[in-house]
Image (tube, rainbow, N blue to C red):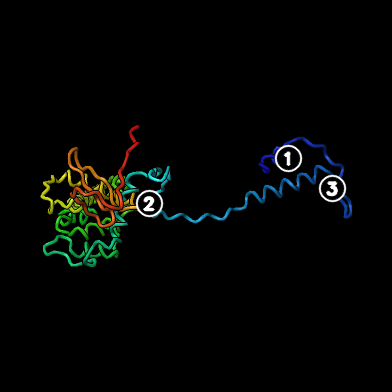
Amino acid sequence: PSVTSGANQQSQPSQKSDKSACAPGERQPPQAAELVRVEEAIVIANEPETPCPELSLDRPPVEVIDRKTWRMRGLYEHQMLQLGLASLDKNDLWCEPFDLELPAGLFRERLLRELLSGKVRLQSVGSSDVAAMQWDLRQLSLRQLLRLRVLHLDFMPGSCVIDSLDGIGGTHEAFIECLEGWLFQELGRRATDAGKTNMVLKNNDARILGRCAVLLVAAALAIPDTPWWCWYIDHETRLFFNALHFKSSLLCSFPSVGVLEVVDHCQE
């Protein structure tokens, strides 16, 4: 505002002084002194400000409504998925350490090992190699699928630029979509303990549940009061999902520490 005000004063017509400069010891005319102050203000205003450091987001922003109600907003779904996947990759729920040992018979075994170790970025891989690696994804373990996706969280489907000459963007996008498909499918089966509860999940249903479970993991980062969530995987089946251990329980007993339930207001 001070600069704007000064600029307005500078643009106002003023009477010309009879002297082009003031002799030593003489006072400057009011108009000249005002112009000097305006120039100083403009110089100060144009100095570059110190950039603020970027805030690293490690949990969703949450607003406390009351003692039992929280509200989360301000993030897109893919950002919540990124937080949830990154948290799962660091979680202690994996009994075994991360292993780069890959099954035999892969088309691009060496390249996959370099990707999983972080030595190579997917964006630097040629489209033919990326297309060949899609067939190898189904043979990777859940732990390896998760690590591969977390190493490329900044690579979102639909965000890459498609090359009109060889379709590099489309090939890489298809690889990420295929990777997410296998990853969420396996996460969905693990989150619902399908093998232990004799639940029969179709592949597409398992993918949907896997995405939902990852979103719950991300939400749990902001509300540590209890790790348990009430989760209706269909209209009839209710599970108690533990976001910390990434597993569900069909037990009828209510968890002693209480549970949380999601109310979606996005469609309202």
* Quadrant assignment for the C terminus: top left
Q: Left or right of 1: which side holds 70?
A: left
Residue located 19% across and 47% down the image: 252
**Residue 160 picture location, percent across and down:** 32, 48
In what element is the residue under mark 2? Answer: helix
Residue sitting farthest toward the top:
268
Label 1 amino acid? Gln
Sooner in the amino-acid sequence: mark 1 or mark 3: 1
**Residue 229 picture location, percent across and down:** 28, 48
Q: Left or right of 123: which side holds 144?
A: left
The quarter holding residue 4 reads top right
Instruction: Check disc 1: other Cα within 10 Å, few if <14, some if 14-19, many if 20+.
Output: some
Disc 1 vs disc 3: Cβ atoms closer than 8 Å?
no
Q: CA distance from mark 3 to mark 2?
A: 62 Å
Residue located 28% across and 47% down the image: 157
Between 219 and 19, which is closer to the camera in this rendering?
Answer: 219
Visible in this render: residue 252?
A: yes
Instruction: Check disc 2: other Cα within 10 Å, few if <14, some if 14-19, many if 20+.
Output: some
Disc 2 vs disc 1: Cβ atoms closer than 8 Å?
no
**Residue 161 picture location, percent across and down:** 32, 47
Q: Nearer the viewer, mark 2 or mark 1?
A: 2
Q: Which mark is residue 222?
A: 2
Which residue lies under the disc numbered 1?
10
Q: Is residue 2 above or below residue 118?
A: above
Between 40 and 254, which is closer to the camera in this rendering?
Answer: 254
Q: Which mark is residue 28?
A: 3
**Residue 28 picture location, percent across and down:** 84, 48
Between 196 and 151, which is closer to the camera in this rendering?
Answer: 196
The quarter holding residue 164 reads top left
Sooner in the amino-acid sequence: mark 2 or mark 1: 1
In what element is the residue under mark 1? Answer: helix
Visible in this render: residue 166?
A: no
